[in-house]
Amino acid sequence: MGTYVPNTQAQKDAMLSVIGVKSVQDFYAGVPQEMLVDSLALPEGLSELEVRQKVTAMSSRNRVYGTVLRGAGAYRHFIPAAVKSVVSREELVTAYTPYQAEISQGILQSIFEYQTMICALTGMEVSNASVYDGATAAAEALAMCRDRKRSRAYVSACTDPQVIETMRTYCFGSGMALEVLPEKDGRTDLESLKSIAADTACVYIQQPNYYGNMEDAKAIGEAVHAAGAKYIMGCNPIALAVMETPAACGADVAVGEAQPLGLDIAFGGPYLGYMAATKAMFRKLPGRIVGQTHDVDGNTGYVLTLTAREQHIRREKASSNICSNQALCAFTAGVYMTAMGAEGLRQAAVLSMSKAHYFAGELKKTGLKRVHDGEYFHEFVTECTDAEKVLRALDAQNILGGLPLGDNKILWCVTELVSKNEIDRAVSVIKEAC
């Protein structure tokens, strides 16, 4: 875009000065240096074909593992062939935003059906058309709950660290206070909820949490509401097929990362943030909402409803500046949920959970015991005296091991795509390494 924005260098320098950085590169200070590339190592004067061949050769260095035992926010699930076949049909992909309803019925209907299925999964009464990713959805949910008298938010320490960092960024910009509830034995410390501040707007927990453990969501919800605050749950959508819905747990807002719903891991994105809420909260949902209506002849039609783009660009009054959505990713999630059906989603969840429990049992035999007790879904943490050695041994066998958490702990994940033979093979490698 830099080519098309006619700012002089002096204007750019002035903007950077106001922001408090010296160069555009400073925006990427938080990105590991080894991830930054100034330019590709290509000689000058190559033809398009030669460039394509060299770049393709470079891409072959990307590692695609045969077996994946890692999750931590990005999950490898089976995607029916019908999903990619449907979403790649060009007549179903709208080039621009669907404000002109009369020529955008296809994309509007797909979003409406996506919203309907998200409501069915979460038990909530209304869903928006999605936001950029799960971390954004969580941060936007905090802003939804803020009012003049309550401007403090709490987040469980058992939440994905990247989600917490995104929340901090949002709260820094809006002046909202953010505090972290302590962890106790791999779960949110219920006792800490008794001492939250009187100006608390909301409390956020992740279910299952970052360590894979199931929180006592109902008890947390009761404690949050007793303090007069709103209750936000960030849920894995596959787990929602077998666990109690956020609505049943008393949540006011349900959010999460919808990447497991038919989106490839794809080296980090694009992803999809879902957001749903109770009827009492729907006016505060950011972004777009698609509604169903009828025309003068009684035919069913779909329109953007309840919220106008203009309200999100009045920065002084807006609770959110999001006025777009992840339409193609939401469409993909909708097609995936349609192809899988309620029973298919439940089967994926049951297989993931049962295989994870089998894997945990086999790891225990090798000396890698679970760190936490209690119920868990498809992720769990084990102790490991030499985590790096174990992960290197797995890597040598084309197996992506769990995520090292430090202190010789590993966060493992199993989905329905991992077979019993693959689990047994991984356990054999781990046993030998130990």
Image (spheres, helix red, strand yellow):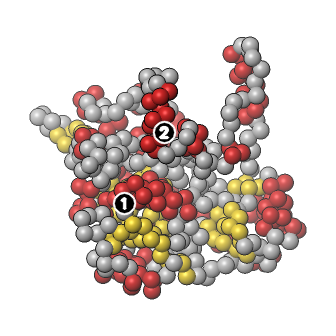
Q: Nearer the viewer, residue 198 or 339?
A: 198
Give the residue type at disc 2. Answer: Leu
10 Å crowding of disc 2: few (<14), some (14-19), many (20+): some
State whether residue 154 is above or below residue 124.
below
Q: Which residue is mark 1?
A: 175
Q: Amino acid at mark 1?
A: Gly
Dividing the picture into quadrants, the one containing residue 254 is: bottom left
Q: Position of residue 432 (x, y in %)?
A: 88, 68
For the C terminus, the image quarter is bottom right
Residue under the point 35% across and 45% down: 322
Q: Position of residue 200 (x, y in %)?
A: 33, 73
| 358 lies above or below 263 | below
Q: Which mark is residue 382?
A: none
- Asked if residue 62 is positioned above or below residue 74 in the image, the reply reads above
Residue highlighted by disc 2: 16
Image height check: is 430 above or below 127?
Answer: below
Quadrant of the rendered structure where residue 52 is?
top right
> What residue is shown at x 52% (from left), y 72% (from top)?
157
Q: Is residue 212 visible?
A: yes
- Kindly state the secondary structure of the residue where label 1 is placed: loop
Q: Nearer the viewer, residue 414 or 40?
A: 40
- Is 40 in front, or is 58? 40
Spot occupied by residue 218 in the image (x, y as percentages of width and height): 39, 78
For image coordinates 27% across by 56% down, the residue present is 284
Residue in the foreground of this view, choosing between 162 and 38: 38
Mark 1 is surrounded, within 10 Å at the Cα level, by few (under 14), some (14 to 19) or many (20 or more) other residues, namely few
Q: Is 286 placed left or right of 30 in the picture?
A: left
Residue 346, can we see it? no
Spot the residue most to the right: 432
